[in-house]
Image (spheres, rainbow, N blue to C red):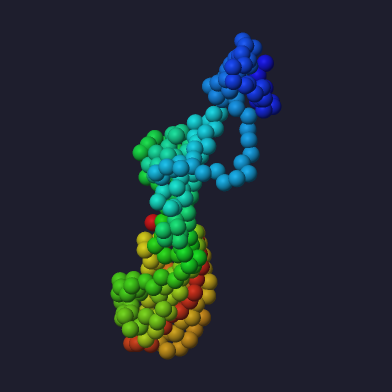
């Protein structure tokens, strides 16, 4: 009977010219057959690895094959970068089309950590960069260019400033601050324009949301307003699906501003939910 896999096999030492009998060969044969059966049947006993496990080769890949599932897990050394993946053997492939795929890339070449996902469905797929940690600790999410919480200055565009029914003239030099930051679907934006001109008694002033974002829910708050040089109470509001911020003298937006030349100023820092473009 074979010793494998319970105990190490011990064969008697044979001296030169010592006869080898059938039971000697049968013992060797039993061990070989037991090992072969385990290899073919996938019943090799589990073992813990106390020393480093080295997989050698060009772009070596360690595959963790769960025989009870289609999707596999892999660890790959790709030119010094470590790629950990689940249900994918490449950026556009998937073992199991019914499941999503995930790749975590530890990029020694750039000092970054990147997370890619692709939804369930047939291949080829287009993986999405959902999280990127920069070498300086900045975190980029949802494939965005700017890091989470970093402020982005909005380029000047006269069309981003509109008076309700009357021309509101905001020149580039009038813009003190017009910038925003994003964390998930929360936008924080600061608007501060001064020495602007209003052609008539508008009931509201409109400032555009940046980069194609729109409001996802009603939000409102207080704002600073200098109406023809006189500081008065003011409010701001963002509505669902709206691409602008409304500024007014009251929450019903039915109080008229005073026409002015270089004497209208508005300022507020606002946070609210947004829809992604």
Quadrant showing the C terminus? bottom left
Q: Residue at x 58, y 22 (%)?
A: 35
Whether residue 1 can be seen here? yes
Q: Is residue 104 above or below residue 270?
A: above
Quadrant showing the N terminus? top right
Q: Residue at x 33, y 84 (%)?
A: 173
Foreground: 269 or 3?
3
Q: Is residue 57 above or below residue 205?
A: above
**In this figure, what is the number of numbered marks?**
0
Q: Where does the image place residue 253, in percent across and percent down from the top left?
A: 46, 71
Foreground: 145 or 49?
49
Residue 29 appears left or right of 145:
right
Q: Where does the image place residue 160, in percent across and percent down from the top left?
A: 34, 71
Q: Is residue 5 above or below residue 119?
A: above
Foreground: 263 or 120?
120
Residue at far top of view? 22
Q: Is residue 42 above or below residue 113?
A: above
Q: Residue at x 50, y 71 (%)?
A: 270
Residue at far front of view? 17
Residue at far bottom of view? 229
Q: Where does the image place residue 92, in percent across and percent down from the top left?
A: 38, 42
Foreground: 58 or 152?
58
Q: Residue at x 31, y 80 (%)?
A: 172
Whether residue 166 can be seen here? no
Q: Where does the image place residue 8, in percent across and percent down from the top left?
A: 67, 28
Residue 126 appears left or right of 104:
left
């Amino acid at each position: 009977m074979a010793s494998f896999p319970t105990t190490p096999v011990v064969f008697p030492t044979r001296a030169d010219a010592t006869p080898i009998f059938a039971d000697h060969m049968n013992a060797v044969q039993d061990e070989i057959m037991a090992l072969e059966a385990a290899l073919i049947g996938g019943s090799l006993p589990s073992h813990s690895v106390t020393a480093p496990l080295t997989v050698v080769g060009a772009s070596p890949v360690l595959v963790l094959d769960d025989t009870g599932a289609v999707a596999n897990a892999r660890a790959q050394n790709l030119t010094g970068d470590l790629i950990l993946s689940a249900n994918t053997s490449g950026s556009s492939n998937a073992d199991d089309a019914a499941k999503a795929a995930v790749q975590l890339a530890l990029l020694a070449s750039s000092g970054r950590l990147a997370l890619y996902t692709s939804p369930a469905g047939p291949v080829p797929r287009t993986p999405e960069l959902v999280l990127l940690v920069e070498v300086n600790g900045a975190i980029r999410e949802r494939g965005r260019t700017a890091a989470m919480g970093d402020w982005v200055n909005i380029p000047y565009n006269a069309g981003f400033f509109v008076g309700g029914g009357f021309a509101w003239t905001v020149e580039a030099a009038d813009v003190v601050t017009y910038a925003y930051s994003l964390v998930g679907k929360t936008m924080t934006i600061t608007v501060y324009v001064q020495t602007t001109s209003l052609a008539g008694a508008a009931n509201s002033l409109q400032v555009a949301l940046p980069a194609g974002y729109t409001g996802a829910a009603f939000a409102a708050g207080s704002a600073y307003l200098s109406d023809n040089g006189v500081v008065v109470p003011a409010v701001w509001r963002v509505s669902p699906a709206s691409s602008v911020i409304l500024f007014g003298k009251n929450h019903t937006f039915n109080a008229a501003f005073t026409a002015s030349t270089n004497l209208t100023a508005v300022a507020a820092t606002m946070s609210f939910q947004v829809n992604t473009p």
